[in-house]
Image (tube, rainbow, N blue to C red):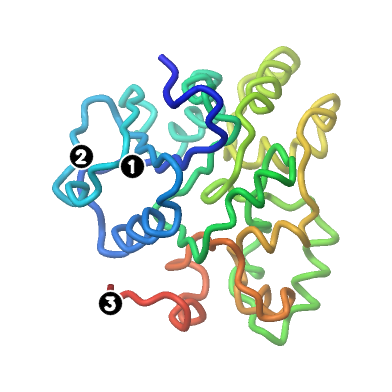
C-alpha cells in the first residue's frame, strides 16, 4: 500500500531502528519536526517494533513499517534503500527527504531544493579518513580533493525523486547484480561511473551540494561556503563535534 496524499510533493522520511532514542537523536527529531512541520513526517521502522514513549510528544507523525530483517545492521539498511519496494511505498510523493537521526536541520529550504529538479542530493563526502575533520585553514585542500574524486552524496540527509529512483533501480537491476555496498554510493559515485546508469539520475555539482548539507570536515566546508550554513548537516556528533557545538545546543 502506498502512503500519502495524491499529488503531494514531498515528505520527510525518518528511519528508526530502536523504540527509544538517545538524547542527541531526540534533539535531531525535535529540530526536524519544528523546522519542517509544514510537511508530512513519516517514521520508517521494523514491523514488530512499537515506538517508545519518546514519540508520544509528536502525535502528527505517521508510521510505515517494513520487515524487521531490513533493520538488522547497516547491510540490511542498504538493502532496504536499494529496493524497489521501499520507493514504491512513497509513490504518492514526488520527493522524499531522508532524515536520519544524526542529521540536524537549520532552516526550511525544502521547497527550494525540490524546485531545482535534481533526482538526488546529499552532503558531498569522501571515504578517506584524512578528510573527516579538516580545519578552516584546509579549505583549499578539501576543495581540491572534492574536485579530484568521485564524491559520495551522503544518504543520511538526502533528497530523492521517487519515480527517478524507481526507474534507476529497474535499469540497474536489469544490467547488474544486486548492489552490495553503501546505498548512497550506488546513487552518486556509481551513477557517474557506470554505463548506462550515468544517464538516469540528475545530480548537483559538489559546490552546490555543499549548500544543501555538510558532513565531513565542516570547519573547512564552512570556509568554502563563506560562512553560510547549509539547509542541514549530517553526522554532527561524529565529524568535528567541537565545530558544531557553536551552532547546535545539546541542552534542549
Give the CA separation, mark 3 to mark 1.
Answer: 22 Å
- Residue 110 on image: x %, y %: 58, 51
Give the CA separation, mark 1 to mark 2.
Answer: 9 Å
The quadrant the C terminus occupies is bottom left
Which of the two discs, 1 and 2, labels the residue nearer the N terminus? 1
- Can you tell which of label 3 and label 1 is closer to the viewer? 3
Q: Is residue 126 left or right of residue 149?
A: left
- Residue 215 on image: x %, y %: 58, 63
Is label 1 in a helix, a strand or a loop?
A: loop
Is label 3 in a helix, a strand or a loop?
A: loop
Mark 1 lies on residue: 16
Which of the two discs, 3 and 1, labels the residue nearer the N terminus? 1
Which of the two discs, 2 and 3, labels the residue nearer the N terminus? 2
For image coordinates 73% across by 81% down, the residue present is 138
Q: Quadrant of residue 213?
A: bottom right
Mark 3 lies on residue: 251
Q: Nearer the viewer, residue 195 or 20?
A: 20
Q: Is residue 1 left or right of residue 197?
A: left
For image coordinates 67% across by 73% down, the residue present is 221
Give the CA separation, mark 2 to mark 3.
Answer: 24 Å
For image coordinates 65% across by 70% down, the residue present is 130
- Tell me the crowding category of disc 2: few under 14, some 14 to 19, or many 20 or more residues within 10 angstroms, Cα based: some
Contact (CB < 8 A) between labels 1 and 2? yes
Q: Nearer the viewer, residue 163 or 180?
A: 163
- Tell me the crowding category of disc 3: few under 14, some 14 to 19, or many 20 or more residues within 10 angstroms, Cα based: few
- Residue 29 on image: x %, y %: 35, 55
Q: Quadrant of residue 4?
A: top left
- Badge number at residue 51: 2
Amino acid at each position: 500500500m502506498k502512503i500519502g496524499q495524491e499529488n503531494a510533493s514531498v515528505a520527510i522520511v525518518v528511519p528508526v531502528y530502536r523504540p527509544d532514542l538517545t538524547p542527541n537523536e531526540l534533539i535531531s527529531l525535535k529540530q526536524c519536526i519544528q523546522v519542517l512541520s509544514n510537511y508530512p513526517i513519516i517514521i520508517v521502522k521494523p514491523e514488530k517494533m512499537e515506538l517508545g514513549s519518546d514519540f508520544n510528544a509528536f502525535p502528527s507523525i505517521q508510521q510505515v513499517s517494513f520487515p524487521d530483517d531490513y533493520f538488522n545492521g547497516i547491510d540490511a539498511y542498504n538493502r532496504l534503500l536499494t529496493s524497489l519496494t521501499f520507493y514504491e511505498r512513497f509513490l504518492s510523493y514526488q520527493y522524499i527527504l531522508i532524515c536520519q537521526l544524526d542529521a540536524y536541520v537549520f532552516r526550511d529550504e525544502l521547497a527550494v531544493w525540490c524546485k531545482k529538479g535534481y533526482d538526488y542530493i546529499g552532503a558531498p563526502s569522501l571515504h578517506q579518513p584524512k578528510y573527516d575533520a579538516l580545519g578552516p585553514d584546509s579549505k583549499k585542500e578539501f576543495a581540491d580533493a572534492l574536485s579530484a574524486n568521485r564524491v559520495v552524496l551522503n544518504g543520511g540527509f538526502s533528497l530523492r525523486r521517487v519515480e527517478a529512483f524507481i526507474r534507476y533501480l529497474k535499469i540497474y537491476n536489469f544490467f547488474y547484480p544486486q548492489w552490495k555496498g553503501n546505498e548512497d554510493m550506488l546513487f552518486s559515485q556509481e551513477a557517474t561511473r557506470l554505463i548506462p546508469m550515468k544517464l538516469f539520475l540528475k545530480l548537483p555539482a559538489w559546490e552546490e551540494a555543499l549548500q544543501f548539507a555538510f558532513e565531513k570536515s565542516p570547519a573547512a566546508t564552512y570556509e568554502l561556503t563563506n560562512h553560510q550554513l547549509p539547509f542541514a548537516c549530517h553526522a554532527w556528533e561524529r565529524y568535528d563535534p567541537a565545530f558544531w557545538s557553536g551552532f547546535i545546543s545539546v541542552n534542549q
